[in-house]
Image (cartoon, helix red, strand yellow):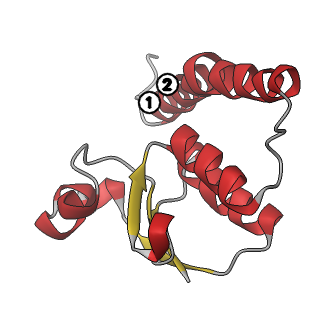
Amino acid sequence: MIELYTWKTSNGRKASIMLEELGLPYNVHPINIGQDDQFTPEYIAINPNSKIPALVDPDGPGGKPYTLFESGAMLMYLAEKTGKLMPQEMGARYQVIQWLMFQMGGLGPMQGQAGWWNRQEENTPKAI
């Protein structure tokens, strides 16, 4: 069973959505980034970047445990592992990859920033 280390953020949910879509069983290990859980030595041993999400596949390449971080890499790995959602034909494959890169490098970060700024505004006292 895949072990998923994540938190309830848009980026943290990508891997769980993919696991659900693929029908793969997994355990969730909450990493509360509001309490700095991502900086514990136990989590850093899984993800040296100290960010969420990360996963451990006990049945990785060669049948050995395999650890991954970075949600885009995790999505590609899971697609290729199962043979689903990632075409083999080069043109179609790169159509998928380009949209993934667009989400990872453009749309996703902008949504994250918008969410952060909206929370800041909600917590900022208003001038009278």
Vertically, is 43 above or below 68? below
* Disc 2 secondary structure class: helix
Vertically, is 76 above or below 67? above
Q: Residue at x 43, y 36 (%)?
A: 123
Whole-percent x, y for residue 4 in the image: 49, 69
Report which residue position mark 2 lands on: 117
The amino acid beneath tag 2 is: Trp
Is 39 positioned to the left or the right of 27 in the image?
left
Vertically, is 73 above or below 105? below
Contact (Cβ within 8 Å) of mark 1 with mark 2: yes
Mark 2 surroundings: few (<14), some (14-19) or many (≥20) residues within 10 A:
few
Mark 1 surroundings: few (<14), some (14-19) or many (≥20) residues within 10 A:
few
Q: Residue at x 33, y 55 (%)?
A: 34
Whole-percent x, y for residue 77 in the image: 59, 50
Report which residue position mark 1 lands on: 120
Is 36 positioned to the left or the right of 58 in the image?
left
Quadrant of the drawing holding the N terminus: bottom right
Q: Residue at x 45, y 78 (%)?
A: 58
Whole-percent x, y for residue 11 in the image: 56, 44
Q: Nearer the viewer, residue 1 or 80?
A: 80
Image quadrant where residue 40 sits: bottom left
* Disc 1 secondary structure class: helix
